[in-house]
Image (tube, rainbow, N blue to C red):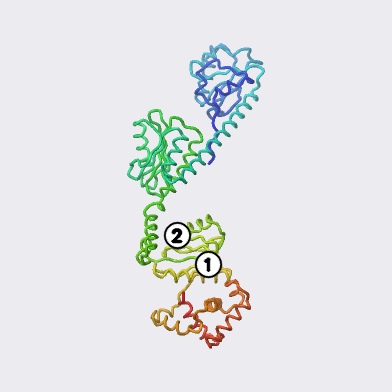
Amino acid sequence: AAPPTPPVPLAALLAREDLGLRRIAGPDAADTAVQWVHTSEMRDPYPYLLGGELLLTAGVHITDPTGADGGLDAYVTRILAAGGAALGFGVAPVHDTVPRALVEACDRHGLPLLEVPPRTTFSGVARAVWRLMAEARHAELRRVTEAQQSLATAAARPDPVPAVLRQLAARLGGLAALYGPDGARLQAAGQAPDAVQDALRDLTGVVRRAVPAAPASAADTAAGSHLAAYALGGGRGFALGIATERREPGDHTIAGAAVVLLSLLTGEHQGDSEAARSAALVRLLLGAAPEETGPLLGSAAWTVVHARGERTPLAASALAAALGTGLVDPREDVVRLLVPADRDVAPADGWTLGVSAPAAPDALAAADAQAARALRRAEATRRPLVRHHAHGIASLVSPEEADTHARVLLAPLAGNGALVETLRTWLSLHGSWDRTAVALSVHRNTVRQRIARCAALLGADLDDPDVRMELWFVLSRES
């Protein structure tokens, strides 16, 4: 979110020579900030002030400049009660000078009082405040943008967490620290007194609590420092703590960017699950069997998904997130994903999906082929998702007998993958020449020629439903 508009220091308004404003009473303007300008000639402006205003008046409501009736004293106290930042009194046409009683009341109660000369209009003062606010907002937006860019650059470094904390501490001018679930400080950058560090650790305990009502952020002050604590995403109990001597309007936005980056860097995908996946990859590369490395991935059975849609890594990552997996292979032609078998794969906008049957790690190659065939069927039938379904009759035949029968029946087509794949696709699409051509990206006449060749080599009538059923049974077992 964009940072709020910074207030205008009253000193910056007094420095404008074109306005000619002069502080004649009240505290020094160095610590006073103006949020807005309001003009009122009411005796009691309290109901119309929101707080932080520079209230401008020509004193029309002042009937006794001596203040003998206590009206001016009450007027000043009501402005302060409403949160008014300062009072500007316009000299002429009602009063030639600022009433002495008003000056004394502002000094007594601590309200800055400015003399507005006759040549300066109230609208001119308001316009100057708006211009200063616009300049301050532009400067703050630039500061926030530069800080966010530096944080993103730091997150890409080899040591991302310390680098992000260093940048955050430098940009905010204080201490930035990462705390673990047990409250221990894991990484820190910047400096703060010991008392402030202790208070900051205690404050992070508010957002680290593992309760549903725990807030996402908390703020406090200690020993003159501003403290802020933020819970990091992922629900693992990590928290970011920040301690600064000053608090600028855009600091919360800068801290928010750091929270997002640190949440990603300390999230679950960078924890135990990521370490297990790395171990599985290393073991596979070193020759381990799939059944040994499969459990490290976090599931005993997997579904293979082939997807075709927008060809960008970002889109592939978004699809993986939607399907609930971090195992994605964003190839140029097709995106392949491994999804835990206990998660349902639903259609995704902008994607065509082919989904395999659940498979153990040692059967993922066959599941990959199933997903590829399912994707071709989905594209040919213009459906968003097609699942591979094993035939119920397969459970009546032992796998060894079924494999032997398949090898014998398909022996005439051995060595000709194009014919086998064409026959399998053609049968899956109920003998449609056009849909088979779409699925295989070939001409429909090529499909006809291949099917005729299959019929000749097999010596079978492919118009016979019994023949088709038997061929589909054995072809559906082939990977």
| Residue carrying label 2 | 327
Q: Quadrant of residue 162?
A: top left
Residue in view at x 49 percent, y 63 percent: 336
Where in the figure is residue 456, as x and y percent of width and height?
56, 86
| Residue carrying label 1 | 385
Where in the figure is residue 322, as x and y percent of width and height?
49, 58
Q: Which of 365 and 65 lies nearest the eye of the viewer?
A: 365
Marks 1 and 2, how far apart in space? 19 Å
Q: Residues within 10 Å of mark 2 (few under 14, many from 20)?
A: some
- Farthest front residue in view: 286
Q: Which callout, 1 or 2, points to the residue nearer the camera? A: 2
Left or right of 19 on screen, residue 182: left
Where in the figure is residue 16, as x and y percent of width and height?
61, 21
Q: Quadrant of residue 203?
A: top left
Tell whether label 2 touches label 1 (CB within 8 Å).
no
- Vertical arrangement, residue 333 with respect to residue 246, above or below: below
